[in-house]
Image (cartoon, rainbow, N blue to C red):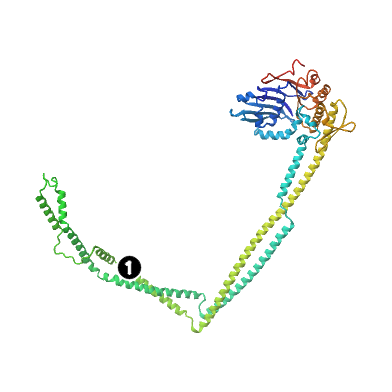
Amino acid sequence: MKFLNLTINGFKIFEHEISIPLETDSTDKNIILLGGLNGAGKTSFTEAIEICIYGEKPNVMNTLINDNHQINGKSCFIKLELEDDIGRHFIVTRSWIQRKRTFSDDWEEELSIVQDGRYVPNPEIMWKDYVDLHFPREVTRFFFFDGEKILSLAADNPDKNLRSSLEAALGFDLVKMLEADITTILKEEDSKRKKVNDKEIEWRLKQIEALEAKKQDFSLNLNKQLKEIESIEENTDSLKDDFRRTLGFEVDDLQVKEDMRREEITLSNKLPILEKNILEFFKSTLPLALLSDLFIGVHDQLNLESEIAKNKSLNEVAPNLASNIVSEIEIPSTICCNRSLTNFEKNELIARVETIIRQMSSFEHNKSILQLSNYQERAVLSRIEEVEGRWWESRIEQTLKNQQEVKDKLNQLQQSLIRSRIRPDLQSFYEEIISELESFNSQRGSKMKEIELNQNEIVRVDGQIKELKIQLEETYRQFEASNEREEFLEVTERVKNLLSDYRDFMCQSKISELEKHTLEKLQEILHNDKVASLTINPKTFNVVLHHKNGNIILKDNMSAGEKLIYVLALLYGLGKTSKLNLPIIIDTPLSRLDTIHRNKLISNYYPNAGHQVIILSTDAEIGSNIYPNLENNVKIALLLTNNGNFTTVQKEYFKGEI
């Protein structure tokens, strides 16, 4: 992988947008030299690259945005252009926008990825997967480092974080991850495995066998009962034949005879009711029907007496009525005069009106004979209308017809019953046959109940057998699946063991290679030859240096410069062994070294440290006395300059000083 360009705007000291070219070529010019005094932004440069690649927590990022951008709410972005080992071109841009000006922690991060000229959808997921695969964050401490801060790697007992980072850099973490994944799979598959053995299958087979035997017993009993029913029916048919030959009719006719007896009783009870209804009719309606010719006179008399009653009532109210009429018409305009009536005239008029009313209501020579009340009159008229309607004729006709039909039917039944009477000499035979038939019917009923119970039991047991066979089939399937899973677990366990063996082999191989490259570079840089050998513990990654006299060299007793050279040699060996083709960024590269070791590092280490080496230096580290030794390998030399408020980039490295 190779960095091509870095653009920063609004990050820490970089208030204004600056662009820093980083591209190197395939020749010996593999070094980018970025100079700057303290506070010019060299460390911020490294932080910007790391944040652009890996991102940063919001609460941390809020403190890294330039102060003027914070105050004015300006956006901030870092854009890194790079190319990976297979030629894919990426532009990675992280930008931060302040959505609300009221809170300092409202900066929202946005990630944009352009790959080979095309924007990548869902960049967060894609970029995380890409980074985790090609340059996980754990290994960057070995490629992006500060010369002052990496001295912790020279401790005699490295911490766990260092060990995990070394494992990641050497590729052991992937093998461990595979082993952990396989262990998880083994546990999950083992928990899913339902262990089925031959005993379970044998137990289910015995259950089915026992139920099959039970079903067979029920079937035998059923066949026996069916034969008994057949025998009963044969005996019943034989008795019926004897009955028919002896008595001349079928046994089944006895039911018909019984029905006839019941019908005879019903008709015998019905006949008196019909006769009673006819008698009641003759008592109530027939006398009136015979006198129907006299109904006209009765009608006339009732109408006459009704009028007499009305006239009588009118005579009784005549005085009051006449007075009321005169009172209504005494208005002058009504009687065609221009004055009111005098009392005399008014009384005369009332008398004349009353006389007229009485003349209208007088019926001479008529007398009231019946003298009925209104209720009695309505009852008589209703009764007369009933008789005059002659509805009783059809009713009495239908009643008489029903009476005759009942008599005829009753006579027929009685004649049939007389003909079917058992002769006295055959009565005992009849009773004996009937008794035996009833006994056979009782036996048949009991047997039919037993047959039904047996059939139900057969159905129930058959259902149990089917259910057990389904369970047995499932058991067979689980047995086969268990065997297949067992084979899978065995194969997976062997793969896990192979991975473990491979990890041990890989570890030993990588450790040996790391020991070789580290020792070679260490001996090459040190001006003395006191380090004769170097060993690394494959479990703890503790590095032990051996003096040429055989004694162990304690790293804690080494000078700061020697520790820096040791760490750089270890990082060089790590880079060669890991085969991770990543750029190397070195901040404060020579501060702890004397002139001899500085020249050795410049001549032997930095040009060979990697395919792209970015050195962040002050003029005190790489100045006019050191730069010429490095110049042939420098592709780009730039200077970060801080004017007190913000940083800019100059195209010449410490102009006038080199």
Q: Look at the numbered disc 1 and give the secondary structure of its residue.
A: helix
Q: Is residue 620 at all visible to an observer of this figure?
A: yes
Going by the picture, which residue comes out furthest to the right? 549
Q: Position of residue 289 (x, y in %)?
A: 27, 69
Q: Position of residue 152 (x, y in %)?
A: 78, 31
Q: Position of residue 459 (x, y in %)?
A: 62, 63
Q: Nearer the viewer, residue 420 or 210?
A: 210
Q: Nearer the viewer, residue 314 or 122?
A: 314
- Whether 620 is drawn above or below 414: the answer is above
Q: Position of residue 216 (x, y in %)?
A: 67, 66
Mark 1: few/some/many CA within 10 Å (<14, 14-19, 20+):
few
Amino acid type of disc 1? Ser
Please name the residue shown 48% across and 74% down the image: 256
- Whether 542 is drawn above or below 189: the answer is above
Total marks in image: 1
Mark 1, residue position: 394
Residue 163's image quarter? top right
Tell whether 202 sits left or right of 74.
right
Residue 138's image quarter? top right
Going by the picture, which residue comes out furthest to the bottom? 425
Please name the residue shown 74% across and 16% down the image: 655
Quarter of the picture containing the N terminus is top right
Q: Nearer the viewer, residue 515 or 127?
A: 515
Quarter of the picture containing the C terminus is top right
Residue 2's image quarter? top right
Tell whether 334 sits left or right of 512.
left
Tell whether 417 sits left or right of 59.
left
Going by the picture, which residue comes out furthest to the top? 656
Going by the picture, which residue comes out furthest to the front? 557
